[in-house]
Image (spheres, grey):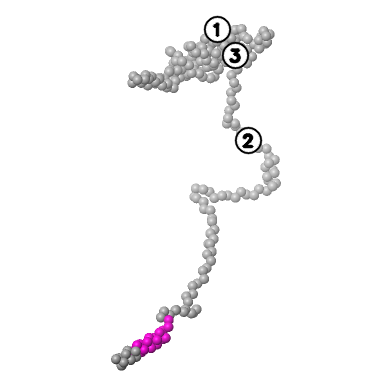
Amino acid sequence: MAAASSCATLALCSSLTSHCKISCQNPNPHPQLSLSKSKLCSFPSPKLYTRPTFSFTRKFSQTEPPPVSEPEVEPEAALEAEAKPTTEVVESAAKEEPKREEIFAVVMIGSRQYIVFPGRFIYTQRLKGANVNDKIILNKVLLVGTKTTTYIGKPVVTNAAVHAVVEEQGLNPKVIVFKYKKKKNYRRNIGHRQPNTRIRITGITGYQDYPAVTLDSLKSVQ
């Protein structure tokens, strides 16, 4: 038994010595890599980016003529040109507005009264029997006025007349007539356009013999 135990201890010691030798031979199982400066990869140094310069030259189309430089004018020639009088006739495009009419009248057509001025037009009720370009005379003149005098009719100015020309027979804008009864289901939507006549006033005559009212007469009454 003693011999067997001694043999076992010897085998254990031999295994321990062999293990110690291996550990001493390779102390660092994971060796570190050391790179020298010569083996390192050298990258080129980055160059600065320089923006390219472009020269812009304006191109002209075939239809557009190139710009022409104005020739230099000598100061003596410029003074001579200024000294010469230039006769240019400038026609004014805007014509002068006509002056306000110096006379007006109040005339009755049908059941309505209108104030009229020579040269202007008005819309009246439909004049029966009047056609376009017909000349008409309005005799119911209630008043005639000018800058200085006034002719007041009682009820009309005798012998006074307003002359006019028929220009158009038309219709007024549409008027909606809506009828409704509640709880009866009754609704009616009707459109109506009243006929009218446009006349242009050409003149006012026959009022001169009628007694006039002036500012002086009113002051004397007061």
Q: Which residue is mark 1?
A: 155
Q: Residues within 10 Å of mark 3 (few under 14, many from 20)?
A: some
**Cα separation between marks 2 and 3:** 45 Å
Packing grade of label 1 (10 A; few <14, some 14-19, many >=20) is: few
Which segment did they paint magenta?
11-28
Q: CA distance from mark 1 to mark 2?
A: 60 Å
Judging depth in this view, the residue of 218 and 90 nearest the camera is 218
**What residue lies at 37% left-to-right and 21% top-to-bottom?**
189
Circle 2 or circle 3, nearest the eye: 3
Reply above or below: 19 against 42. below
Amino acid beneath label 2: Glu
Task: Find residue 73 and report its horizontal and vertical position in percent.
Answer: 66, 48
Label 1 with label 2: CB-CB less than 8 Å: no
Disc 2, SS: loop
Q: Which residue is mark 3?
A: 145
SS at mark 3?
A: strand
Local crowd size for mark 2, using a 10 Å CA cut-off: few (<14), some (14–19), many (≥20): few
Tags 2 and 3 touching, CB below 8 Å: no
| Residue under pointer 2 | 88
Q: Amino acid at mark 3?
A: Gly
**Location of residue 213 in the rendering, given as x and y in whole percent from the top left corner:** 63, 9
Q: Which residue is located at x 51 percent, y 48 percent?
A: 64
Q: Earlier in the sequence, mark 3 or mark 1?
A: 3
Whether 110 is drawn above or below 90: the answer is: above
- Depth order, front residue of 191/42: 42
Q: Is residue 158 magenta?
A: no
Left or right, residue 85 beside residue 104: right
Task: Say what amino acid the circle numbered 1 marks.
Answer: Pro
